[in-house]
Amino acid sequence: WIPKPSCETQSGEMLRARALYPFSPLVRDVGRLVGVQRRWFAMQPREDLRNVAIIAHVDHGKTSLVDCLLKQSETGLEDLDMGSRVMDSDKLEQERGITILSKCASVQIPDGKGGKCRINLVDTPGHADFGGEVERIINMVDGVCLVVDATEGPMSQTKFVVMKALNQGLKPIVLINKCDRESARLGEVESEVFDMLANVGADDDQLDFPIVYASAKEGWATEDPEGTRDAKDMSVLFDRILQHVPPPMVDESSGFSMLVTQTQPNQFLGKEVIGRIHSGVVKREDIMKFITPELKSSEPAPITKISQWFGIQQVEMESAKSGDIVSIAGFPACHVNDTVTHVENNSVIKSVPIDPPVLSIAISSNSASPLSGLDGDKCTFPMILERIESEIETNVSLTITKNQGSERVIVHGRGELQLGILLEQMRREGFELACSSPEPVLKHEGDEIFEPMEELTIECANEHTGMVIEKLAKRKADMAEFDQGEKRSKLVFKIPFRSLLGYRAEFTQDTRGDGIIHSMFDGFIPYKGHIQRNDKGAIISTESGKATGFALGSLEARGKLFIEPGDLVYPDMVIGESSREQDLEVNPCKEKELTNVRAAGKDERVKLSPATKMSIEQCITYARENEVIEITPKRVGLRKIHNSAERKKLARNKKNANARKRG
């Protein structure tokens, strides 16, 4: 049993070496006879190190688990607050309670042989829109810890991250989290995890996974679901990592090479690149170069800084060796997926393919708005374009398309949340910009057009399933699974991505906030034509000035308002949603007429309901084809592309075209 020596990627050599390690004495002798490359057998396991990724669906407890492991290890963080979520260091992550970027940390534990073992932990996002973060780091680790909620079980994103791990030949450790809840259903969730792994193509070895029952919030883990849960002890999980995650197969005799998986700015050194050292040893001041995926080499340059993670802090080191996850500086022009290597090497390390984007928006300056320049200090298109290009360098799942001579750039991403996070970051940095309504990314193959499809998973009360199925049928969704329980049902649909735009808000209203909805990319399907959306008309301002309570009081019965008294408005600005399908043009600045005649009774007091304030993601899904999203540091709103006269002309032409078609 000898694998073919035809693999040209270093990652393939590592996988074969890992598989051959138990039989290395026999295979080494046979290898010499048949001429197998000796480098496979030069790799040796590094027993003092483990590299593990924490993967899961959103809100299943990954970051809380990392906090717990940091607290209970020998990292000097014993006083860490259990609920602090120290890995969510970004301000947006703290506000929204989600993980957006993959981040590294390390813990040190006894190895059971009188020594110490360092475990590099990689915390990954759980939302499907940030799946590129998972794809990017999956080749840095040798094993994964799959966290599953004890109540919800495996969800759509769980399936996505598991597929990426299995494709790399990684064996999962399944941790069923939140077992302290009364609603936990441990036996059912365990069976669901096994079925999911079998359905996505796991082999027999990967299906023989260890299971740990835990509560990251309370800080305990056990292999016995009925065992004691009082002691705050995660040693069971540490033992399973040492036992089931293979040590890195290293080759220190070869030249240095490392695949860049992440970059971070450094105000003194320009840029640091992060990755796992694949082979060799690196020291400070060593002369290295980087090679792009297109095999373009840079000029040799010295390594100016090497650092590793100890706990959550980066500590500078004089050297690092194969298997370590490090951050190095010295290559300001290096990007994600480049290979940093020694000067004599001309080959690259192959990266994991990234799934294609499914949604696009056009971003331009906000110069067409009457309120342009009032809030932000970065308003010109070159400044906007420079900021977006810098984001593309680090976010591999985003792509852009620039049209020569055009004052706009088209950004392609995974979903409205990912694009909304980018726009929110730019808004907080002082940018003023405008973006179009979203469009799906279509593929053209000959005369056929294909559009992205999503696997939609819904969990709701039985009384709401009829309404959910009816509305999704109008959006051309095909039901793939229907599992009805005593009180709640689980539904799985195959649906065009564009059909989901705006549906999540409807779903929340239809299920009265009690439903759960998630989706994941599931390939491309032939274009399904026009899809019915329950779009209502817009309430459009015809005047400039400040909105008054008197005017808004009379408009409240005619729709849902997006503004409050005192807000600045201008012509063609969308200030609300009409209760009818037709647009409604109004004057929100109208004031009550004053006379010198005193009324016998008191004036009526205007009582307004709170205005609906939409986030950037909500605006992206709400915006229609003839609307533009206006984003400034102080406000987010919508406006019509055409003025009143142009809208009337377009409506008249459309009406005449329909009449000719009927005739």
Image (cartoon, grey):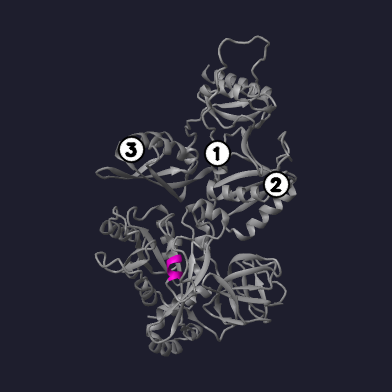
For the residue labelled by badge 1, is the local secondary structure a helix, a strand or a loop? loop
Whether residue 265 appears in this view of the structure is yes
Residue at image mark 2: 403
Q: Nearer the viewer, mark 1 or mark 2?
A: 1
In the image, residue 22 sits, relative to residue 225, either above or below, namely below
Nearer the viewer's eye, disc 3 or disc 2? 3
Q: Circle 1 is placed at which residue position?
A: 614
Residue stretch rendered in magenta on the structure = 66-71
Contact between labelled residues 2 and 3, with CB atoms less than 8 Å apart = no
User: Which residue type carries mark 3?
Assistant: Thr
Residue designated by label 3: 465
**Cα gap from disc 3 to disc 2, whole angstroms:** 45 Å
Identified by mark 1, the residue type is Met
Residue drawn at the location 61% of the way across and 26% of the way down: 540
Residue 37 lies, in percent from the top left, at 50, 83
SS assignment for the magenta stretch, majority: helix
**Image x and y of residue 543, in percent:** 68, 24
Q: Is residue 68 magenta?
A: yes
